[in-house]
Image: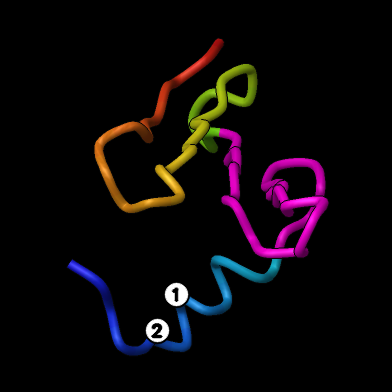
Amino acid sequence: MAKNYLSQSELRYLTEIDHHDHEALAALDPVDGRGLGVTRYVRAAEDPQAAEIASPSPTGGRAGGSVRIC
């Protein structure tokens, strides 16, 4: 279900990355510049050697996913 707005805390979480414990990478179509998707990782505070990675489907379908790596 799509959201019409983000709360202040959601906006802060999605835009304030530190490139160490929280990273986000965006893919753009080289032909027209459209956004294709965003993948991000967030290092787990309770286990600094692990990170959660999420890569949602750009179409909103079921192809996306997340994984915890150590």
Amino acid type, residue under disc 2 in the picture = Leu
Magenta segment boundaries in residue numbering: 17-43
Amino acid type, residue under disc 1 in the picture = Glu
Give the side of residue 27 with respect to residue 19, left or right. left
- Front residue of this view, candidates 34 and 48: 34
User: Which residue position is annotated with label 1?
Assistant: 10
Q: Residue at x 79, y 41 (%)?
A: 20
Q: Residue at x 44, y 20 (%)?
A: 68
Q: Residue at x 58, y 76 (%)?
A: 12
The colour scheme used to paint the residues is rainbow
x%, y% of residue 48?
Answer: 63, 25
x%, y% of residue 62?
Answer: 25, 36
Q: Quadrant for the C terminus, please.
A: top right
User: Which residue position is annotated with label 2?
Assistant: 6
Q: Are marks 2 and 1 in contact (CB under 8 Å)?
A: yes
- Tell me the quarter of the picture where residue 31 sits: bottom right
Q: Quadrant for the N terminus, please.
A: bottom left
Task: State yes or no: residue 39 in magenta.
Answer: yes
